[in-house]
Image (spheres, coloured by chain):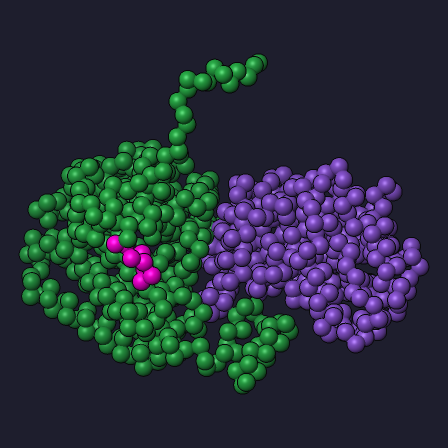
Chain colours: A purple, B green
Amino acid sequence: MPTMNMIQALNDAHKVAMRADNDIVVFGEDIGFFGGVFRVTEGLQKEFGKTRVFDAPISEGGIVATAVGMAAYGIKPVIEIQFADYIYPGYDQIVSEVAKMRYRTAGEWPMPMVIRTPYGGGIFGGQTHSQSPESLFTHIAGLKVVIPSTPHDAKGLLLAAIEDPDPVIFFEPKRIYNGPFDGHHDRPVTPWTKHPASDVPEGHYTVPLGKAAVVRKGHALTVLAYGTMVHVALAAVEEQGLDAEVIDLRTLVPLDIATIKRSVEKTGRCLIAQEAPRTSGFAAELSALVQERCFYHLEAPVERVTGWDTPYPHAYEWAYFPGPKRLKRALEKVMAD
Amino acid sequence: MSDKDPALRANAPRLQLHVPEPLFRPGDTPDFSGIKVPAAGSAPRPDTSAPAVDTHPLTTNLVRVLDEQHRAVGPWDPKLDADTLRKILKDMVTVRVFDDRMYRSQRQGKTSFYMKCTGEEAIATATAAALDRDDMHFPTYRQQGLLVARGYPLASMMNQIYSNKGDPLKGRQLPIMYSDKAHGFFSISGNLGTQFPQAVGWAMAAAIKGDSRICMGWIGDGATAEGDFHSALTFAAVYNVPVILAVVNNQWAISSFSGIAGAERATFAQRAVGYGVAGLRVDGNDALAVYAAVQWSAERARTNAGPTLIEFFTYRAEGHSTSDDPSGYRPIDEAKAWPLGDPIERLKAHLLALDEWDEKRHSALTAEADATVRAAQKESEKLGILPQQGKDNVGSMFDDVYSDVPWHIAEQRDAALAEGRD
């Protein structure tokens, strides 16, 4: 089985999908000849030609809008928004058009498309290359929201997203494109080759949307995380020597509530980790769901570990990032009672 | 390098913000003699494969075909046969009768909202005649003429307006936000302007797949101020997209006159110049000019010669919608003073001048349209009107959010149905 980092796995997913389906078109800023600023689309234009893989103007609104027109025509756009921080000019088209089209046309014009976008901090990207805006999309009925945390899942989830009949916002945790991240920014980066989930099957396979993965079994508490924070949380519970069950949500909408419920009912404690700002983040939704469904199993209040309610500050990146220290305090708190 | 001393600006004029004002407000006597109306037939007609720049003088001109004697003149005369002219006339009359009936329905409390296109009927109906039946439209809410001209059942339109049991959109959309794939009519959005770049995307897909169908996007003068207008023109220009982009400049965006969208500085057709695409400014109340401009743009698109931006110069003769009262912001009789006349009267006069029409036939046509619309209304109202809706089949409001109903929406559906039993 080939070993791949997340970029190679995502690239491979595009190739597998595009070879099987001539109606898939890929476009976005710098994604054509150059292959994208993170190289996810490298080689696609050469293999599939300029009318299926092409550079778009710096116009996220235009990129999403033309994808809507293409989906209406009957082909399948897989578009890249260069950074999640750039998605806002396309927000009206995503929220008012992409998300609602199946509904408002009573099913006549569904909008199957994938909007891929790298998100999250930890790369010294400053305020405009570090954000985690997933909750702006989980709040919108009609969208599915997917966030992989390993090369294996990245390829399988992207193929599932491309084949899905609904529009999918596919957030790629750019901090872990090249290797998992334990939250210790001062330590050398571990490459994906050292991680078992860098074994990526050749050819076609899917990781189903709406299915979480229990990435660490345990009995003392449940940790819910996605994207980069899966690895940061895993490292933290190891460091604390906790018998924690860690769940990688993989899909935020639709959420795998059954797996969450089963785990929290077993452990009686729940910590939720997200990199995004705290207020109205997806962790708040998770916290409410756990409280509504597992209240009588809970032995301690549900704890959230999040970014701060500030913009992502460049020089203070590691004071902002919900790293090992914040996790340690929260883990101690949720285990205290 | 030095910043000038602010004291040196002591005698500079005070900066002023210019807030555009329309020519006339309620109580004023409208006088449009300042609007230049070039003679019919005077605008040149470039070859459809001409470089875009050859069309740019037309962006400050006005393509007109029908002259003061009601003859079709000049190089833009599409030389239509009488049957085609009568079809356009019939469609226009039907639209006007339909609008009047539905306006009245709203006033009778049978629905919540309606929008007329009075004075603008030529634009959609003559466009429909000029394009092929399988060409695609991304319309705004004032192109109901496309559906009428393409033979979409009037009762289906009314079912949508009433959100009744026959509503193809299952009671989910505001009245007049039609959508019908089989008639090449994309779902209308209330977020103005979104459809303009979507039309470009549809045409890009047609080009990617080597199709021969083209696409037409529509927008109003007010919504040209949206970023979507800019992205539509940018993408259309960059990829030389086979699309026709139409601005219906009816002078008014609810209460804001076209100057609030920039019309004091340049025509809407002139936007084409900066993007390097073909641009035409067209008398939107002249059905033959509309037909000719769309036909020209369609041929250009079909031969990969590029997109065209058309400004249809017209006037919104009635309120923005049933929720609007234009007497609050413009003279009541302004529409009558509009120098380009009424599109139905002008086409009728042309047919009369050709001796292909007479008053008796016109009365019969109006009576027939009236009977057709009334029959459709009767048929539609059997399926219900708005005040009766929203009670049955509440569970259906949870369908089509996704391809399947995910667990969280299924739970909410159960809760809604339980509320219904309380």
Residue placed most toward the observer, A206 or B234: B234
**Residue A273 coordinates in the image, percent (x, y):** 77, 57
Q: Position of residue B254 (x, y in %)?
A: 34, 52
Pick out the residue farthest to the bottom.
Answer: B421
Q: Is residue B105 magenta?
A: no
Q: Answer with the quarter of the image where residue A82 lies.
A: top right
Q: Quadrant of residue A215?
A: bottom right
User: Would you say residue B324 sits in the magenta stretch?
Assistant: yes
> Does residue B3 lie above or below A80 as drawn?
above
Which one is nearer the viewer's eye here, B331 or A235?
B331
Span of residues in magenta = B320-327
Residue at x 46% of width, y 58% of height:
A73
Q: Residue at x 37, y 75 (%)?
A: B386
Does residue B395 appear to the left or right of B52 in the view shown? right
- Asked if B109 appears above or below B267 in the picture, the reply is below
Placement of B185 over or under B412, stated as above or below: above
Viewer-proximal residue among B305 and A238: A238
The residue sitting at 35% across, 77% down in the picture is B385
- Image coordinates of residue A255 in percent, x first then y, are 68, 67
* Quadrant in the rendering for residue A45: top right
Percent coordinates x, y for residue A129 in the rendering: 67, 42
Q: Is residue A332 visible?
A: yes
The N terminus of chain A is located in which quarter? bottom right
B148 sits left or right of B65 in the view: right
